[in-house]
Image: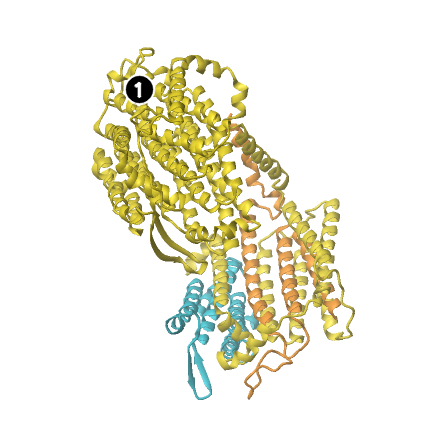
């Protein structure tokens, strides 16, 4: 079972990295989504998968039964999902804004900073 | 289709807000909570925004999404202050026991989370759907 | 005692408004603050007379064990009095020096001077080494600001950066030493360190600690090979040079070494190193002093030589060496500050900095000339000045230590040069007829005279009546240094001793140097190569080399292609993970199939992998978005099948919202997608992505080797209902146990979405009117 999880996580992450290496803004964005989903799954797997009962204390009991899923990684992942969502939304807005001002979603076209030249060349000019 | 969707969307919207509140308040004992509740409520408003327009969703929300978000953040923060007074420990919650029902500042905290999530997500939805014509 | 530092700091804070309020009288008004502090410190004289110390403690950073413990003993009192005493005179002098400048300049300068004074007092008064270090670095910072005070001059900026790099860098080295001491002894309190000195010396770190502390002190006190920054620091306004770069700050290294000499008393290599470094510094600085042209430069080089003498003296053992150290610190502070004041007045009056172009100034600056002569007589070591007494002790310390003849010859020569310098800097600009100055821009004002006159006459008064100062200052300070009370007879006349013979020799050579100054000077100026060797070439080599590395690495790494940045990060992660997997304690281990395969889960997992691959292969962005959605929903199902309904619900909601939002984004972008990568690039990216996936696969597969620590989860499970009154443990963790985390996280969500709200504000004016 473990190896199947490992395969699925590795496949998601590998695809995520491949998309991340793209020059197209939207594909980078989708790469981030894949990577964060896979990371959440990775944390989930790392927390152990021995039991499948939700970590909810049954009525009439005062403590959690021993045969329930690990609650701690779930709590961590829950916030991570929402934060990952906010991150992607922010990146999407950034990309949209860049597209509006530059007219392209390709990072190879975003050369405003490079067009200013190397800071070292400026320094050399000033010293001379 | 053009008639059914907007009409049904009102119904779905009310249903989803109801479900989200249910999720929020049962969250302490059953699966649910502020994050899930907030997301479901935000989906409800998003539905409204897509079926009608952003204006309709904003009217349904009544308050500004940024204000809702700020208010939620403030509420969550304030819910930690009583603990600071009694135990010198921020966010150590106070509890009130009425029979078998427990009411505490933890619920207030979760309501704050709920508001932040709704407000935040709606900031995104409204901004991105503004100006997109039907 | 904390009031001393608080008042000094308050003085720094009010200096700027005061300058606007009092105008030209500001110097006089503000000098009341250091004067008051001088008196406050002096009132403790009785407490430290027998070698004791006054201690005041208050808690500062209790969680780190850092206390604001102030400790005043004889040695810190000597420094405290020098700092506040000369501080008073510098404030008065600066008031007159800046009289014609805008009030803002004077306010800024006085604020920096008083801030520096605060830092100095903090350094010499703190007992905790961490606190001392903070003040120590503050002196470096204020020194940087003061050297670069005339920020419009490139030379001043360069010198300021050089001094900051050298002293600040040395400070970091010192900090490393302090941390090692804390690691070894478990305390930062100097009193306790001194009490447990044997333990420290016996520890394996002792050698490293000693070297680190020495480097810290050598950078601050401009010892070889860090001697070059001090002469360049003369770009500072002269009052600052007099205060920081001769009388006080550069002596901090001496202060530190003297303090730690007691700790490392049982390690002879410590003292021997100091003697060698001190002697080298003396020689190098003396040579450079003979060659220097600028008035202040000559004084600066002689200051470096004096600091070398002090380092050498600390390296020597015994009571006499302690007395000699203390006496020399006092004598040097008095005459050197006075000479700097005189130099400042002369340069201020003529606008000419080169010693060769100054002459006959006594007609215009008669009182300054007298003060210069008095101070230089003390510097030359002639009786009855205090400089003479301190020099006698210097030779006595050397002779009683039984050191071989080389350091003594060095000391005689260097003192002769100092004697020569003293003669040249006082006689030449004021009395020589060559290069007579015909007009001066500024004359003498009372503010310009108080400092040099008081200090110079102090030199002769102490020399004539050494008993008072001997009992009040020298005795307690030397006792504190030595570790036990010393009966000091600080006397002018010691009888016909070998020391007197050496003194006479020094004066004779010194006179010869004055007579043949121009000849020696011209001769030395021809030897460029030697002086390049002992100049700041090494510093420039290091700085230029660092910049070169930065430049070339920037060209390689920051080439402007975002793809390359990502690729480098990914490659590093792959390499790091692979290394950890192979070299880690568990080794590479893949858990054998354990037979727990559940068909339902496996199918969904394969679906998620297929979705990920489909995202990559998708031709249109919409198709890719749908594929990403499939992955998200598949993962939600996996959460559901493994007992995480909360996660499943959240994931489904988020995935839905993501599709809704990204659709809106895609609607605004051009639909047509062309390949953004060449075939070769894609091939390389596939390789990198595959490597990343492979490493992750191995990592996840071998993860189950390490047993899971469930204690925290068990605790949450057991107490969730009893203490948090909730049956859903996940929710209780979120809103109760880890509520501060959650608060932080919703704040992140709020700020990110707020940023989006602001970023996309100008979607169109239509939306505004709708509201």
Camera sees residue C92: yes
- Of C680 and B15, nearer the camera is C680
Which residue has dot 1 on it?
C350
| C596 w.r.t. C544: above or below | below
Residue B91 in picture, x, y percent from top left: 44, 70
The hue of chain A in the figure is orange
- In the picture, the quarter occupied by the C terminus of chain C is bottom left
Q: Residue at x 78, y 70 (%)?
A: C593
Query: In the visual, does A6 lie left or right of C14?
Result: right
| B25 w.r.t. A110: above or below | below
The hue of chain C in the figure is yellow
Camera sees residue C418: no
- Of C251 and C707, nearer the camera is C251
Residue B5 in picture, x, y percent from top left: 56, 71
- Classify mark 1: helix, strand or loop: helix
Disc 1: which chain? C
Residue B105 in picture, x, y percent from top left: 43, 75
């Amino acid at each position: 079972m473990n190896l199947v999880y490992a395969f699925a996580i590795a496949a998601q992450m590998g695809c995520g990295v491949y998309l991340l290496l793209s020059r197209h803004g939207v594909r980078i964005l989708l790469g981030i989504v894949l990577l964060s989903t896979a990371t959440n799954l990775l944390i989930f797997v790392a927390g152990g998968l021995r039991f499948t009962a939700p970590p909810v204390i049954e009525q009439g009991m005062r403590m959690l039964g021993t045969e329930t899923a690990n609650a701690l990684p779930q709590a961590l992942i829950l916030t991570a999902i929402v934060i990952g969502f906010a991150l992607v939304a922010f990146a999407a807005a950034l990309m949209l804004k860049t597209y509006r001002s530059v007219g392209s979603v390709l990072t190879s076209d975003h050369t405003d900073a490079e067009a200013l030249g190397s800071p070292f060349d400026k320094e050399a000019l000033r010293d001379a | 289709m053009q008639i059914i969707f907007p009409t049904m969307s009102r119904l779905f919207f009310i249903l989803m807000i109801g479900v989200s509140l249910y999720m929020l308040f049962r969250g302490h004992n059953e699966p649910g909570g502020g994050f899930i509740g907030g997301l479901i409520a935000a989906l409800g408003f998003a539905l409204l925004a897509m079926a009608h327009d952003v204006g309709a969703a904003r009217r349904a929300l009544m308050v500004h999404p940024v204000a809702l978000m700020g208010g939620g953040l403030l509420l969550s923060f304030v819910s930690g202050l009583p603990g600071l007074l009694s135990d010198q420990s921020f966010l150590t919650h106070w509890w009130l026991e009425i029979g078998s029902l427990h009411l505490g500042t933890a619920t207030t905290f979760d309501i704050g989370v709920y508001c932040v999530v709704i407000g935040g997500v709606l900031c995104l939805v409204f901004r991105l759907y503004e100006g997109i014509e039907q | 005692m904390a009031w001393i530092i608080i008042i000094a700091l308050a003085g720094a804070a009010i200096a700027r408004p005061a300058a606007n309020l009092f105008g030209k009288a500001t110097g006089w008004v503000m000098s009341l603050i250091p004067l008051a502090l001088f008196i406050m410190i002096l009132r403790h004289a009785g407490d430290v007379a027998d070698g004791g110390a006054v201690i005041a403690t208050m808690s500062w950073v209790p969680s780190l064990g850092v206390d604001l413990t102030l400790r005043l003993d004889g040695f810190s009192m000597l420094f405290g009095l020098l700092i506040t005493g000369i501080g008073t005179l510098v404030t008065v002098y600066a008031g007159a020096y800046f009289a014609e400048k805008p009030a803002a300049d004077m306010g800024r300068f006085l604020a920096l001077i008083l801030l520096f004074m605060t830092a100095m007092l903090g350094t010499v008064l703190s007992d905790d080494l961490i606190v001392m270090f903070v003040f120590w670095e503050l002196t470096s910072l204020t020194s940087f600001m003061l050297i670069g005070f005339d920020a419009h001059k490139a030379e001043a900026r360069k010198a300021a950066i050089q001094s900051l790099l050298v002293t600040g860098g040395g400070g970091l080295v010192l900090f490393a030493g302090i941390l090692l001491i804390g690691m070894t002894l478990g305390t930062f309190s100097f009193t306790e360190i001194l009490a447990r000195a044997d333990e420290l010396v016996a520890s394996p770190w002792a050698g490293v600690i000693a070297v680190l502390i020495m480097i810290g002190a050598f950078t601050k006190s401009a010892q070889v090979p860090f001697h070059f920054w001090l002469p360049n620091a003369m770009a500072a306004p002269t009052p600052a040079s007099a205060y920081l770069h001769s009388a006080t700050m550069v002596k901090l290294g001496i202060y530190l070494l003297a303090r730690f000499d007691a700790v490392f008393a049982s390690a002879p290599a410590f003292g021997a190193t100091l003697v060698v470094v001190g002697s080298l510094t003396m020689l190098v600085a003396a040579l450079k002093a003979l060659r220097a042209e600028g008035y202040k430069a000559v004084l600066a080089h002689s200051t470096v030589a004096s600091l070398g003498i002090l380092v050498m003296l600390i390296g020597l053992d015994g009571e006499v060496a302690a007395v000699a150290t203390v006496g020399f610190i006092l004598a040097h502070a008095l005459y050197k500050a006075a000479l700097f004041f005189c130099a400042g007045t002369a340069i201020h009056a003529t606008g000419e900095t080169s010693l060769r172009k100054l002459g006959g100034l006594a007609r215009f600056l008669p009182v300054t000339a007298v003060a210069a002569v008095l101070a230089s007589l003390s510097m030359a070591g002639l009786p009855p000045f205090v400089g003479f007494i301190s020099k006698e002790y210097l030779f006595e310390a050397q002779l009683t230590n039984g050191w071989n003849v080389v350091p003594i010859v060095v000391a005689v020569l260097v003192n002769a040069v100092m004697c020569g310098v003293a003669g040249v800097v006082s006689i030449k600009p004021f009395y020589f007829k060559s290069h007579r100055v015909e007009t001066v821009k500024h004359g003498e004002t009372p503010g310009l005279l108080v400092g040099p006159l008081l200090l110079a006459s102090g030199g002769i008064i102490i020399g004539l009546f050494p008993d008072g100062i001997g009992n009040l200052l020298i005795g307690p300070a030397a006792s504190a240094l030595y570790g036990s009370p010393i009966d000091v007879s600080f006397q002018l006349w010691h009888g016909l001793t070998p020391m007197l013979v050496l003194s006479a020799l020094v004066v004779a050579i010194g006179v010869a140097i004055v007579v043949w100054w121009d000849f020696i000077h011209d001769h030395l100026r021809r030897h460029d190569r030697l002086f390049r060797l002992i100049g700041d070439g090494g510093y420039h080599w290091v700085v230029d080399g660092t910049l070169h590395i930065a430049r070339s690495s920037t060209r390689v790494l920051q080439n402007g292609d975002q793809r390359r940045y990502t690729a480098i990060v990914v490659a590093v992660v792959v390499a790091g993970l692979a290394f950890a997997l192979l070299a880690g304690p568990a080794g590479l281990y893949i858990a054998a199939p354990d037979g727990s395969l559940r068909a339902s889960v496996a199918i969904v997992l394969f679906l998620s992998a297929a979705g990920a691959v489909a995202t990559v292969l998708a031709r249109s962005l919409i198709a890719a978005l749908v594929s990403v959605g499939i992955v998200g929903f598949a993962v939600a199902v996996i959460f559901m099948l493994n007992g995480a309904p909360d996660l499943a619900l959240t994931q489904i909601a988020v995935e839905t919202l993501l599709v809704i939002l990204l659709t809106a984004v895609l609607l605004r972008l051009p639909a047509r997608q062309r390949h953004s990568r060449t075939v070769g690039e894609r091939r390389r990216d596939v390789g990198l992505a595959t490597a990343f996936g492979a490493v992750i696969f191995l990592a996840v597969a071998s993860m189950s080797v390490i047993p899971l620590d469930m204690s925290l989860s068990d605790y949450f499970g057991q107490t969730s209902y009893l203490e948090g009154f909730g049956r859903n443990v996940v929710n209780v963790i979120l809103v109760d146990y880890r509520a501060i985390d959650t608060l932080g996280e919703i704040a992140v969500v709020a700020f990110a979405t707020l940023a989006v709200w602001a970023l996309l504000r100008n979607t169109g004016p239509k939306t505004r009117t709708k509201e």
